[in-house]
Image (cartoon, rainbow, N blue to C red):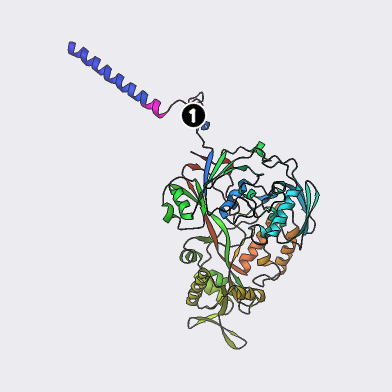
């Protein structure tokens, strides 16, 4: 009996110890938050969201957004300097420092500015700042990335402190897109030599952030209390530290060590520098568009079926892998697939059976491995001249296309042209096929491809009518309808064959919480939701 009592006591003691251990374990794993709701569940506000972002720049020159040659400074300047308009992530123009603009002929623009805006030094923003910036950019000739935006500006006049007139040398479709250059303060620079003054170390800001401090190793940005949209600013990041590195290799190493939160690069070998784990990668479309222009005035390429056969012979997947090492992505159309104007996918149209079917539709026959046709009682072989600029990668692509097309009975003779000769070939349209790579404009202007004297000599009544019409369309749905039709013509009539588009890698460390929806013209879409952990 006595032994049974001791047994019961020992059992109760063990159960008590176990209950206490379970209680301590649960209280450690699930501490009660001060934000716990009445039902006991913790709210999302209990998450500690870091308010400091760390970026990196190599080969730093200046924080002046007009003078800098550094692409990373240009990217970051979107947070420091405002422009007259902004381009949203769908490719639409939106008011910014300019609240309205109008033009009757695409040549003279009247621009109305926001009033009451202050720079970070408490001076007021006015049309004088815009005029000063435009004049400095015109002085820059081609030395600034934004010089092209002012290429057609003949003069700019002040109407009043919040109104100005821009007069162009010629009508420019969608010129409002080019008003996205950063504005600098005229009063701050005064009579100083804009290009050489020490004021470029720490210029005044009119954006979300201001330049708080600049040292030899770090640039610090802090929230700008004078930002015109500060009342609607609910972004989490309050401070941005920009570490300065002597080389890109040093910057990559800093990212690998966790010293910076984000890098953007077009180097597809980044894994050699930062490894393969411990970060997130978003791949976005770059600006460079690679394509073939088919001269539709050529006796062979005037045949739509031949153009369609060539299109079916282009294996984009293999080209991206073999020629570009996956540093480019497949492309179809000059305007980005993310644009609000068009709806399409960058599909691979490679199809060997389509080559044969299209060629036979036009009376071509394979004889001894070569497509041949009788024209005016003479045998004509399918033989074309391809002009390409002397550039190692483009020449490699031309040779790849030549070699593959030869297996399909199509002979391509390559002409490798110097820069000056290449321009002459284009001017005279002295080619059957032009292998080209162009830098995409910020504006959705298709003149190079479908306007007068375009690269493929392509013309039909419907295209010409749309190209004349869209310059003056203001209704968004109507504009989308017209651009979708231009895309369909581009695809079905095959004056061009889109091949590839450059790629940008936006790489973030795992402790940066950021939904990356970047575009080549702005890395910081959705910035208000970014935070560190």
Q: Residue 86: x percent and y percent?
A: 66, 49
Q: Which residue is drawn at 56% across and 56% down?
A: 285
Q: Of residues 278 and 81, which is closer to you in this image?
A: 81
Q: Of residues 438 and 191, which is closer to you in this image?
A: 191
Q: Picture quarter containing residue 143?
A: bottom right
Looking at the rendered structure, the number of numbered marks drawn on it comes to 1
Q: Residue 28: x percent and y percent?
A: 39, 27
Q: Residue 21: x percent and y percent?
A: 33, 24
- Element on which disc 1 rests: loop
- Classify 10 Å Cα crowding around label 1: few (below 14), some (14-19), many (20 and above): some
Please check the rendered image and state whether residue 351 is part of the magenta-colored stretch, yes or no.
no
Q: In which quarter of the image is the N terminus?
A: top left
Residue farthest to the right, as pictured: 159
Q: Can residue 5 be seen in this view?
A: yes
Q: Residue at x 51, y 26 (%)?
A: 35
Residue farthest to the bottom, as pictured: 377
Question: Which segment is the magenta one?
Answer: 25-41
Q: Is the magenta stretch mostly helix, strand or loop?
A: loop
> In the picture provided, is 316 more to the left or to the right than 485?
left
Q: Residue 345: x percent and y percent?
A: 57, 58
> In the picture provided, is 116 more to the left or to the right than 377?
right
Q: In this view, does 471 lie above or below 351?
A: above
**Residue at which label 1 appears:** 42
Q: Picture quarter containing residue 448?
A: bottom right
Q: Is residue 477 visible?
A: no
């Amino acid at each position: 009996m006595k032994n049974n009592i001791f047994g019961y006591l020992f059992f109760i003691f063990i159960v008590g110890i176990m209950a206490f251990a379970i209680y301590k374990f649960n209280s450690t794993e699930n501490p009660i938050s001060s934000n716990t709701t009445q039902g006991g569940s913790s709210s999302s506000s209990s998450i500690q969201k870091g308010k400091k972002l760390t970026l990196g720049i190599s080969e730093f020159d200046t924080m002046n957004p007009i003078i800098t040659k550094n692409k990373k400074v240009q990217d970051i300047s979107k947070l420091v300097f405002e422009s007259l308009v902004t381009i949203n992530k769908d490719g639409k123009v939106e008011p910014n420092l300019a609240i309205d603009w109008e033009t009757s002929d695409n040549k003279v623009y009247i621009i109305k500015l926001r009033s009451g805006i202050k720079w970070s030094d408490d001076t007021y923003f006015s049309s004088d700042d815009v005029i000063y910036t435009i004049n400095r950019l015109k002085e820059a000739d081609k030395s600034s990335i934004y010089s092209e935006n002012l290429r057609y500006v003949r003069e700019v006049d002040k109407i009043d402190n919040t109104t100005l007139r821009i007069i162009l040398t010629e009508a420019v479709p969608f010129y409002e897109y080019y008003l996205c250059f950063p504005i600098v303060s005229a009063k701050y620079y005064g009579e100083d030599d804009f290009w050489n003054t020490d004021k470029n170390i720490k210029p005044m800001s009119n954006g979300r952030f201001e330049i708080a401090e600049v040292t030899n190793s770090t640039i610090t940005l802090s929230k700008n209390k004078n930002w015109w949209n500060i009342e609607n600013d609910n972004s989490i990041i309050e401070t941005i530290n920009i570490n300065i590195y002597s080389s890109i290799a040093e910057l990559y190493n800093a990212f690998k060590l966790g010293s910076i939160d984000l890098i953007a690069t077009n180097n597809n070998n980044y894994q050699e520098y930062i490894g393969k784990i411990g970060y997130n990668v978003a791949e976005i479309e770059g600006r460079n568009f690679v394509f073939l222009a088919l001269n539709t005035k050529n006796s062979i390429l005037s045949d739509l079926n031949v153009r369609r056969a060539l299109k079916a012979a282009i294996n984009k997947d293999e080209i991206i892998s073999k020629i570009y090492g996956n540093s480019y992505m497949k492309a179809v159309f000059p305007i980005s697939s993310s644009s609000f104007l068009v709806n399409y996918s960058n599909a691979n149209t490679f199809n060997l059976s389509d080559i044969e079917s299209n060629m036979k539709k036009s009376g071509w026959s394979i004889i001894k491995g070569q497509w041949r046709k009788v024209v005016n009682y003479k045998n004509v072989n399918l033989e074309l001249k391809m002009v390409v600029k002397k550039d190692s990668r483009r020449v490699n692509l031309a040779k790849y296309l030549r070699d593959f097309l030869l297996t399909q009975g199509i002979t391509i003779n390559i002409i490798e042209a110097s820069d000056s000769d290449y321009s002459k070939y284009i001017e005279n349209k002295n080619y059957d096929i032009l292998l080209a790579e162009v830098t995409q404009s910020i504006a959705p202007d298709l003149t190079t491809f479908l306007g007068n004297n375009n690269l493929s000599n392509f013309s039909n009544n419907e295209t010409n009518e749309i190209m004349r019409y869209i310059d003056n369309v203001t209704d968004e749905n109507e504009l989308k309808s017209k651009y979708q039709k231009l895309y369909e013509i581009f695809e079905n009539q095959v004056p061009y064959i889109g091949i590839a588009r450059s790629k940008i890698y936006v790489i973030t460390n795992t402790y940066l919480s950021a939904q990356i929806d970047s575009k080549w013209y702005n890395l910081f879409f959705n910035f208000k939701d970014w935070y560190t952990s």
